[in-house]
């Protein structure tokens, strides 16, 4: 048994427990524990300001906003999406009875390749669902041009992109809507939670109805909604963790810089450089292993790290398109997805969180150096 400290891939950003207890006291006193209470309203306001977006609606997790966005925009037919993501992206399409169509990714970002999106369009296509993978911005300009040309909606799965700006502007303002996840493993969390970001008040209202069974008021149900509201306890938690997120991102940035410096001369190991004009959130630190050059396969390295208590994760392997629900689709053929297949077979996400020490990172780098 290896006795060295276990280094996990992530660690949740927790609010101060005393402050949280104090807010819990307020909730107990008010007895208002869910249904758009004061903490829910406050967190929506604070997040809209922090994220520099006009309208946001809180959810109970990051999957229901994807499902709800497709409902709110009345998407049908086919939706073009990436196989290189967490399963929830494609599941949300499937849950709406829509056919997912996989397109290949760009090796420079692991995001959907706009040229491959355009090639996948059919008369049934109604929307595109790209992912800002690892928080790296998609080519939102090229994607919008395609969407405008063919009259398609764009819903960004921005689960990784909390706080990411391009030229000072939030990435969440791209497309028709963007979704966020506040799951424990993400840069900013509310234990479980999520949000939908939209551009106008009318859509905000619609989404607010949809996440509360479609209730417009006490007696009117205007749509077949669902229940996906965030409660007061997690909203209070979120208000407190929001105060700590900038410092957490700053620490992640330092960790990323230490990795970049330590890994730069290892043959067969590549990683992403920062993108110009982008405020990154350093949500993940993926490396890609060229087995021939490195002299070891990805899985060999992955298990060697594990033996030494350094727990990386193979995000995003296997590709969504290989799971039993989806692999029968024509677009799921690996021949259609050579780049995604190659990236999925060579990736390891290294430990990345706000509590990572210099020693943790050096230990990880030394295992990779051998
Ligand atoms: C985490 C994640 C989700 C789902 O979020 P939950 O809050 O876990 O439901 C969706 N898409 C991507 C890309 C994710 O990483």
Image (cartoon, helix red, strand yellow):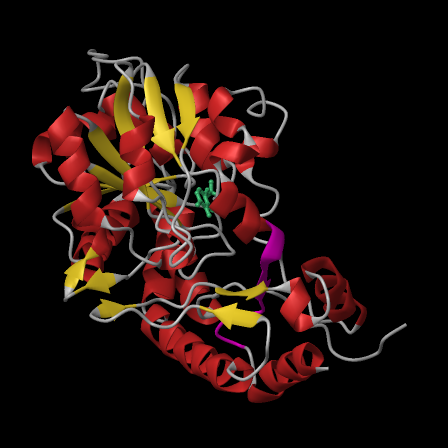
| Total numbered labels | 0
Instruction: Return the residue found at the far right.
Output: 1
| Direction from residue 364 to residue 264 in the image, left or right | left
Q: Is residue 218 visible?
A: yes
**Residue 336 position (above or below residue 351):** above
Q: Nearer the viewer, residue 367 or 254?
A: 367
| Direction from residue 220 to residue 303 in the image, left or right | right
Q: Quadrant of residue 161?
A: bottom left
Q: Is residue 74 magenta?
A: no
Which residue is located at x 32 percent, y 14 percent? 77
| Direction from residue 103 to residue 149 in the image, left or right | left
Which residue is located at x 48 percent, y 69 percent? 271
Residue 180 percent across, percent down from the top left: 34, 46
**Residue 132 position (above or below residue 23):** above
Q: Nearer the viewer, residue 49 or 145?
A: 145
Q: Nearer the viewer, residue 33 or 119?
A: 119
Q: Quadrant of residue 113?
A: top left
Q: Nearer the viewer, residue 322 or 131?
A: 322
Which residue is located at x 67 percent, y 77 percent? 368
Residue 216 percent across, percent down from the top left: 19, 20
| Direction from residue 169 to residue 247 in the image, left or right | right
Q: Is residue 350 magenta?
A: yes
| Residue range of the region highlighted in magenta in the rendering | 345-355
Q: Is residue 174 visible?
A: no
Image quarter (top left, top right, bottom left or bottom right) of the C terminus: bottom right
Residue 295 percent across, percent down from the top left: 72, 70
Image quarter (top left, top right, bottom left or bottom right) of the N terminus: bottom right
Residue 179 percent across, percent down from the top left: 31, 42
């Amino acid at each position: 048994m290896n006795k060295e400290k276990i280094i996990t891939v992530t660690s949740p950003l927790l609010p101060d427990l005393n402050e949280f207890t104090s807010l819990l006291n307020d909730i107990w006193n008010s007895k208002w524990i869910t249904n758009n209470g004061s903490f829910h309203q406050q967190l929506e306001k604070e997040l809209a300001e922090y994220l520099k977006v006009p309208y946001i609606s809180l959810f109970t997790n990051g999957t229901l906003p994807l499902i709800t966005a497709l409902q709110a925009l009345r998407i049908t037919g086919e939706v073009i999406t990436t196989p290189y993501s967490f399963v929830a992206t494609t599941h949300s399409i499937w849950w709406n009875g829509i056919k997912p169509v996989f397109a290949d990714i760009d090796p420079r970002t692991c995001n959907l390749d706009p040229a491959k999106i355009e090639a996948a369009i059919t008369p049934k296509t109604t929307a595109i669902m790209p992912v800002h993978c690892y928080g790296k911005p998609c080519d939102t300009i090229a994607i919008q041009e395609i969407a405008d040309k063919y009259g398609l909606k764009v819903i960004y799965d921005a689960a990784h992109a909390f706080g990411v700006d391009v030229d000072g502007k939030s990435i969440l303002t791209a497309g028709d809507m963007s979704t966020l996840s506040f799951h424990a493993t993400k840069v900013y969390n509310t234990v479980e939670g999520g949000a939908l970001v939209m551009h106008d008040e009318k859509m905000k209202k619609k989404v607010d109805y949809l996440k509360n069974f479609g209730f417009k008021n006490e007696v009117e149900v205007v749509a077949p909604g669902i229940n996906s509201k965030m409660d007061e306890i997690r909203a209070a938690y979120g208000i407190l963790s929001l105060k700590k997120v900038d410092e957490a991102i700053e620490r992640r940035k330092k960790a990323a810089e230490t990795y970049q410096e330590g890994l730069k001369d290892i043959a067969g190991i590549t990683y992403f450089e920062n993108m110009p004009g982008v405020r990154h959130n350093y949500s993940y630190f993926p490396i890609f292993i060229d087995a021939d050059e490195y002299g070891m396969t990805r899985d060999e390295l992955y298990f060697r790290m594990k033996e030494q208590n350094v727990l990386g994760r193979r995000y995003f392997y296997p590709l969504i398109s290989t799971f039993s629900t989806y692999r029968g689709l024509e677009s799921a053929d690996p021949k259609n997805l050579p780049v995604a297949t190659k990236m999925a077979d060579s990736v390891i996400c290294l430990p990345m969180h706000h509590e990572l020490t210099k020693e943790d990172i050096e230990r990880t780098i030394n295992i990779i150096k051998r």
